[in-house]
Image (cartoon, rainbow, N blue to C red):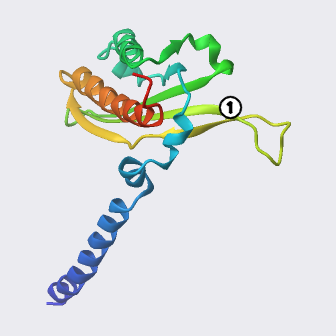
Amino acid sequence: MNSLASAAAARPTIARLVTFLLLVMLFSPMEAIAQSDPGVTTLKGVHKVVQVIETLHPELVSLVDTLALRQAVELKLREHGIRPLPADSLGLGVMLYLDIGSTYVARAGTWGLSAHIEVEEFVTPHRQPEQTLLTATWEGAIDTGIATDGEVSDEVRSMVSQELDLFLNAWLEANPNSR
């Protein structure tokens, strides 16, 4: 009986915890960025970017054609009037950083995936003009997905496309006459 009574008493606590977690997720900073992007003004005048795709998980590399992924991103950027720069030009401009995170669950034969896009620039703090820092000046929401080995390539491409669309929509908002 004691365990039944304690389980019944725990239900309201669990309900409050779930409600709290849902509220935290609803009002998290990443959601706020996705809904209203105050950083969009930092994209004004950006017409060249160095594209950096973070190195994929070693087991994921064999399933995803990273060259084709890079070329698809470059093509989409060019279609919108943004010129991709070679990787060795990093110190010269704005970096479009794309991180694709992954975790493989062998027992389930499934990949847990995440994609996140940021625009990073070298900035000089007013208080320390002798210092230059690479910092994110705009970022999109994190996209997540689950895929099997056979689906992972399509899922990664889809997630990257969604992240790139977030960036391009924000960029077009900041540069309305660029198209």
Residue 14, image x, y percentages = 26, 75
Tell me the quarter of the picture where residue 121 sits: top right
Q: In the rendered view, tell whether residue 77 sits above or below residue 29.
A: above
Determine the residue positioned at 36% across, 35% down: 166
Camera-side residue of 86 and 59: 86
Residue at 49% x, 35% y: name it: 118
Residue 68: % across, % down: 34, 10
Q: Secondary structure at mark 1?
A: strand
Is residue 124 positioned above or below 15 on the image?
A: above
Nearest the viewer among 58 and 23 is 23
Measured as percent of width and height from the top left, residue 139 is found at 48, 40
For label 1, count other residues whose C-alpha is less than 10 Å away and answer few (under 14), some (14-19) or many (20+).
Answer: some
Left or right side of 8 for 91:
right
Looking at the image, residue 4 sits to the left or right of residue 21; the answer is: left
**Which residue in the structure is indicated by mark 1?**
122
Q: Specify the quadrant that holds the C terminus.
A: top left
Viewport quadrant of the N terminus: bottom left
At label 1, which amino acid type do we have?
Phe
Q: Residue at x 38, y 42 (%)?
A: 142
